[in-house]
Image (tube, rainbow, N blue to C red):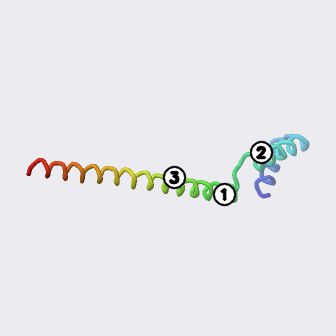
Amino acid sequence: MKTELALYQALISINVPEQKANAVIDALENDMHSLLATKADVTALRTDLTAELKTEISQLEVKLTLRMGVMLSAAVGILIAAMKFMH
């Protein structure tokens, strides 16, 4: 509310007609309410992104576990094969 009053007073002080000053303030209020993010918007976005990030991390953990298991199995198989060839 302080911003609108300060803007109104500034426009009136430079001889802008009252109707045009009110139109400018109305347009500014409309843009501020429709274009700017509120704290609730940012909090909701943060919550959504956190949930998505946790899901992606858990999927990557599964992939990494599977890859490590395959590599470990391959390494053990190679070691067993190498030991059989040495004897």
In this picture, is 47 found above or below 86?
Answer: below
- Kindly state the secondary structure of the residue where label 2 is placed: helix
The residue singled out by tag 3 in the image is 56
Q: Quadrant of the N terminus?
A: bottom right
Q: Which residue type does callout 1 highlight? A: Ala
Q: Nearer the viewer, residue 54 or 74?
A: 74
- How far is the residue under mark 3 from the one under mark 1? 18 Å
Q: Where is residue 86? Give x, y as percent.
A: 9, 49
* Residue depicted at x 24% and y 53%: 76
Task: Give the mark nearest the N terminus, 2 or 1.
Answer: 2
In the picture, measured across the screen, residue 62 lies left or right of residue 81, that is right
Task: Give the mark nearest the N terminus, 3 or 1.
Answer: 1
- How far is the residue under mark 2 from the one under mark 1? 21 Å
The residue singled out by tag 2 in the image is 31
Q: Nearer the viewer, mark 2 or mark 1?
A: 1
In the image as oriented, which residue stretches furthest toward the left?
87
Few, some or many residues within 10 Å of mark 1 (<14, 14–19, 20+): few
Q: Which residue type does callout 3 highlight? A: Glu
Q: Where is residue 63? Give x, y as percent.
A: 43, 51
Residue 9: numbered disc = none
The residue singled out by tag 1 in the image is 44
Q: Nearer the viewer, mark 3 or mark 1?
A: 3
Q: Which residue type does callout 2 highlight? A: Asp
